[in-house]
Amino acid sequence: MDKKTLSYPTAINAKELIKLFTYKVDNEIHLELLQVSHTIELFEVINKNKINLQKWMPWISSVESVDKFQKIVNRLLSRSIKGLDIHTVIFYKQELVGAVCLTEIDSVNKKADIGYWLDKSYRKRGIVSKTLSHFIHYSFESLKLNRLTIKCSTQNVDSNKVAQRLGFKLEGCFKEWEIVDGKPQDFNIYGITTSDWENSYRIKEA
């Protein structure tokens, strides 16, 4: 897949989306739109972090081979082409270290969910906070969304802290929302609007 073959519906501004093909966060971090060519490297990183990731993302347990993972990647790409999601991978010093995505994009009500994960070896370096800050800015400024939400297990301390640090407001708690690690867990829902972001957390223009 290359820039010339990208074909996204007008529900998402295609010209703006292509900016994410390679989106520079800073001199060490950049994002790339998920492509078939990322499959093997992404599988290896997920497999390396499988025990930790499947605690919060149960679907990870089904990632048993590159072939099976290829089907997952194809499904994600299909959703992106339909304008339902945007899936990107995070690179740190040219190493693939995680992913960030918009899912359940509602172009009518201008809202979406945001998700992310990071290789445990690269934590405590500010990668997630920097990446999400730019990704949120991009979602509001370029995609013209009005609202983003983060849903995470009440037991996922790190994700709750990330949401709070970025200015998301706790809006409620879903009781036994998902089965995580074999047990039903409550999930917090955090939200932020473009006006919230502009008032307090917007990236300052140079």
Image: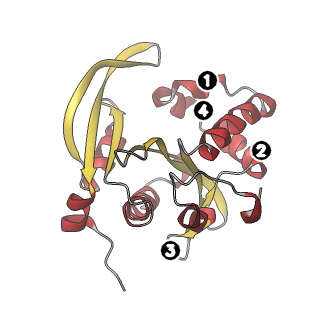
* CA distance separating discs 3 and 4: 28 Å
Pointer 3 local density, CA inside 10 Å: few below 14, some 14–19, many at least 20: few
* CA distance separating discs 4 and 1: 7 Å
Reading the image, the residue beneath label 1 is 61
* CA distance separating discs 2 and 1: 17 Å
In the image, residue 42 sits, relative to residue 154, either above or below, namely below
Residue type at mark 2 is Ile
Q: Is residue 61 visible?
A: yes
Reading the image, the residue beneath label 3 is 26
Q: Is residue 201 left or right of residue 67?
A: left
Q: Earlier in the sequence, mark 3 or mark 1?
A: 3
Whether label 3 touches label 4, CB < 8 Å: no
Q: Earlier in the sequence, mark 2 or mark 1?
A: 2
Screen quadrant of the N terminus = bottom right
At horizontal 47% and vertical 53% (from top left) the residue drawn is 123
Q: Position of residue 63 (x, y in %)?
A: 68, 28
* CA distance separating discs 3 and 1: 33 Å
Mark 4, mark 1: which one is toward the viewer? 1
Q: Is residue 1 left or right of residue 198?
A: right
Reading the image, the residue beneath label 2 is 40
At horizontal 51% and vertical 54% (from top left) the residue drawn is 12
Which quadrant holds residue 172? top left
In the image, residue 50 sits, relative to residue 131, either above or below, namely above
Whether label 4 touches label 1, CB < 8 Å: yes
At horizontal 81% and vertical 31% (from top left) the residue drawn is 67
Q: Nearer the viewer, residue 147 or 50?
A: 147
At horizontal 35% and vertical 36% (from top left) the residue drawn is 151
Q: Secondary structure at mark 1?
A: helix
Q: Position of residue 89 (x, y in %)?
A: 60, 53
Reading the image, the residue beneath label 4 is 50
